[in-house]
Image (cartoon, rainbow, N blue to C red):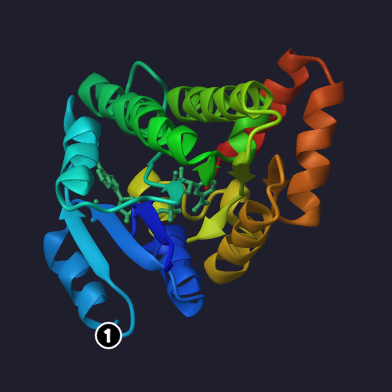
Amino acid sequence: MTKTALITGATSGLGYEFVKLFANDGYNLVLVARNGKKLEEIKQTYTNIDVTVISKDLGVLGAPKEVFEEVEKRGINVDILVNNAGFGLMGKFDDLDIQKQVNMIQLNITALTELTFYFLQKMKLNNSGRVLNVASTAAFQPGPLMAVYYATKAFVLSFSEALVEELAGSAITVTTLCPGPTKTNFGSVANVEGTKMFSSAMASDLVAKKGYEALMSGKRVIITGGFNKAGALGAKFMPRSTAAKIAKYIAGEK
Ligand SMILES: NC(=O)c1ccc[n+]([C@@H]2O[C@H](COP(=O)([O-])OP(=O)(O)OC[C@H]3O[C@@H](n4cnc5c(N)ncnc54)[C@H](OP(=O)(O)O)[C@@H]3O)[C@@H](O)[C@H]2O)c1
């Protein structure tokens, strides 16, 4: 039977690259994002697989449950959940709009957690399933000038690795993708383009492919790029105050 993958944030960047990878392997798709027109355009490009689109703002309280209920109503079994939608914001915590930062927590943390909860129940019934949670190299240290964003990604990594242990011995895998700076719309949304951090951003197709391969092999955590791997490793072994100072430096000047 053809398997189905649900991808959040499917309209651009890494999410859209995941769409292409799954479609290429013959998966049916459930695509979630806010831009309904773009979702329809993507749907139209595929005739050989079933593509269901759900236009939803996952930054709104209750939206993840509505997505789950919509999928249930349509009788779709989700074999693979890709929690990819997310955004960041650059600036000092108290200079940034608090509502936008709360929405970020809602999208990057709450929606990811709720979607995992609902779909995991179904995966447990089938004793089969895979989850890919998109974190970031931001997960490995505090991030001055992107304080809330870094903290949301630390949550994603910690939460996902805890689930790996809870699910040990079952046929359900949870993989966390930790990209470093990657060429997508993220840079302009977060206002980080032109920073030292983004001077050597990776290509989105390459990053998504690494994440996809790790997901399919049930790998626990994948950090993309040698430089990013070294940075994450370095952050583990240095005092957090030093790691935070380095993060501030590379996030700093444009
Ligand atoms: N690019 C990087 O440098 C980088 C590095 C590390 C981690 N990441 C992570 O990678 C993931 C994907 O980001 P990206 O780089 O591919 O950025 P992107 O090109 O901006 O894509 C973000 C996607 O999320 C969707 N989205 C945004 N807000 C949403 C909301 N409230 N409800 C539902 N969907 C929403 C967007 O679609 P709509 O606008 O249609 O809703 C879009 O499809 C994020 O979790 C990000 O934190 C990115």
| Residue 19 seen anywhere in this rendered image of the structure | yes
- Left or right of 50 on screen, residue 179: right
Q: Position of residue 76 (x, y in %)?
A: 27, 53
**Picture coordinates of residue 178, whole percent (x, y):** 62, 44
For image coordinates 51% across by 55% down, the residue present is 194
* Residue 67 figure quarter: top left
Residue ID at (68%, 23%): 165
Q: Nearer the viewer, residue 108 or 40?
A: 40
- For residue 184, side relative to residue 67 (left or right): right
Q: Residue at left 44%, top 23%?
A: 148
Q: Name the residue: 78% across, 40% down.
A: 231
Query: How far across and down, in percent of the image, does residue 85 sit?
Result: 37, 46
The answer to whether 27 is drawn above or below residue 74 in the figure is below
Q: Quadrant of the N terminus?
A: bottom left
Q: Foreground residue, 157 or 202?
A: 157
Q: Which residue is mark 1?
A: 47
187 or 23, which is in the foreground? 23
Towards the viewer: 214 or 88: 214
Task: For mark 1, give the secondary structure.
Answer: loop
Q: Is residue 59 visible?
A: no
- Please, is residue 157 above or below residue 12 in the view? above
Q: Is residue 176 above or below residue 103?
A: below
Q: Given the image, on which type of amino acid does mark 1 rest?
A: Thr
- Crowd class of label 1 (few under 14; some 14 to 19; many from 20; radius 10 Å): few
Q: Position of residue 99 (x, y in %)?
A: 21, 23
